Amino acid sequence: MPRAQCHVPPGLNTLGSLVGAVLALANEGCGSAATFGVDLNRYTCERQYECAQGAFDKVYGDVGECRAELDEINGPIFACEVRSCEYDASRARECLHDVQSADCEEVVDGSAWAHCGDVFVACDETALRACIGAY
């Protein structure tokens, strides 16, 4: 069964770097690798809207637009990680919980995603690169 790792690079203090960081994530609802990416994108957009609304409004019309964009950008990455890596459900739950419960300072400085880097582990790097390259 695929295992996955939620990883968001440090320094997510702007929406642009947040989009890049979310590209690194994937798993299912942090209970399953299949829904993790969608859940993370949803929580990311909701928290960015709440905590960085001025910057958020310059990039997205609403939370739905943010989610659609992140799902489009990150969906293929998450799918490749699900196929090429092991998924750590415990770390995925921790990642999603941290993003959901973070205060706005943690959202703005990126530390809300600190535990999202180890959700997909033990990846077959060759298969992962080939899969991502196909998109």
Image (cartoon, grey):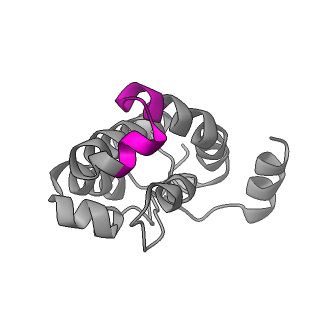
Residue 40 appears in view: no
Query: Is 78 a magenta residue?
Result: no
54 shown above or below 125:
above
Q: Which residues are magenta?
A: 55-67
The secondary structure making up most of the magenta span is helix
At 48% across and 69% down in the image, what residue appears? 9
Q: Quadrant of residue 86?
A: bottom right
90 shown above or below 30:
below
Query: Is 59 a magenta residue?
Result: yes
Q: Position of residue 63 (x, y in %)?
A: 36, 31
Q: Residue furthest bottom?
A: 10
Q: Tally the marks.
A: 0
Q: In the image shown, does 113 or 85 lie closer to the viewer?
A: 113
Q: Quadrant of residue 76?
A: top right
Q: Position of residue 53 (x, y in %)?
A: 28, 46
Q: In the image shown, does 96 or 82 lie closer to the viewer?
A: 96
Q: In the image shown, does 123 or 129 lie closer to the viewer?
A: 129
Q: Position of residue 5 (x, y in %)?
A: 47, 58
Left or right of residue 109, residue 50 in this image: left
At 80% across and 41% down in the image, what residue appears? 135
Left or right of residue 37, residue 75 in this image: right
81 shown above or below 107:
above
At 55% across and 46% down in the image, what residue appears? 2
Left or right of residue 110, residue 67 in this image: right
Q: Position of residue 120 (x, y in %)?
A: 51, 57
